[in-house]
Image (tube, grey):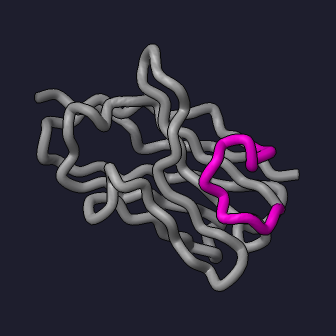
Amino acid sequence: QVQLVESGGGLVQAGGSLRLSCAASGRTVSSYRMGWFRQAPGKEREFVAAFNRVGGRTYYADSVKGRFTMSRDNAKNTVYLQMNSLKAEDTAVYYCAADSGWGTGLASSEYEYWGQGTQVTVSS
């Protein structure tokens, strides 16, 4: 099992930046595919970014490509989501997820473990 704790959310003006962290305990993040998802009020949870376990490839949603970067620090057992050029439509609760599966990890249904979420609010 793995426990995930997100941090780094907050209120930022449009065009600003935030870095979210997802600290894992129980097992190392290199043992899992890892993903970031977000959920805005009244909307479905949507994919943001993910590492898969084969080749270490990183995937991004089209809406964040070129603005968000997902990275991993195995020594700290932490995954990050650097968010730049934030827009009002990025406002959501952001969740970190982990799973030991081998797929691409683009769907929330693929993940077994979830953090509690961290709120990101972008003011326009």
Residue 83 in the image: x percent, y percent? 31, 54
Q: Nearer the viewer, residue 80 or 40?
A: 40
Give the left or right position of residue 10, taking residue 57 as reference. left
Q: Which residue is the extreme one toward the bottom? A: 55
Q: Is residue 33 left or right of residue 2?
A: left
Q: Position of residue 2 (x, y in %)?
A: 81, 52
Nearer to the camera, 90 or 117 = 90
The residue shown at (54%, 32%) is 45
Quadrant hosting residue 69: bottom left
76 left or right, relative to 103: left
Q: Residue at x 71, y 74 (%)?
A: 53
Q: Residue at x 30, y 49 (%)?
A: 18
Residue lying furthest right: 1
Q: Quadrant of the C terminus?
A: top left
What secondary structure predominates along the stretch shown in magenta?
A: loop
Provide residue 55's location: percent of width, then percent of height: 65, 85
Question: Can residue 111 be found in the magenta stretch?
Answer: yes
- Nearer to us in this view, 95 or 57: 57
Is 4 part of what is drawn in magenta? no
- What residue is drawn where x is 47% and y is 50%? 48
Residue 77 pos. (x, y %)? 66, 66
Q: Is residue 34 above or below residue 73?
A: above
Relative to 61, residue 121 above or below: above
First to last magenta residue range: 101-113
Q: How many marks?
A: 0
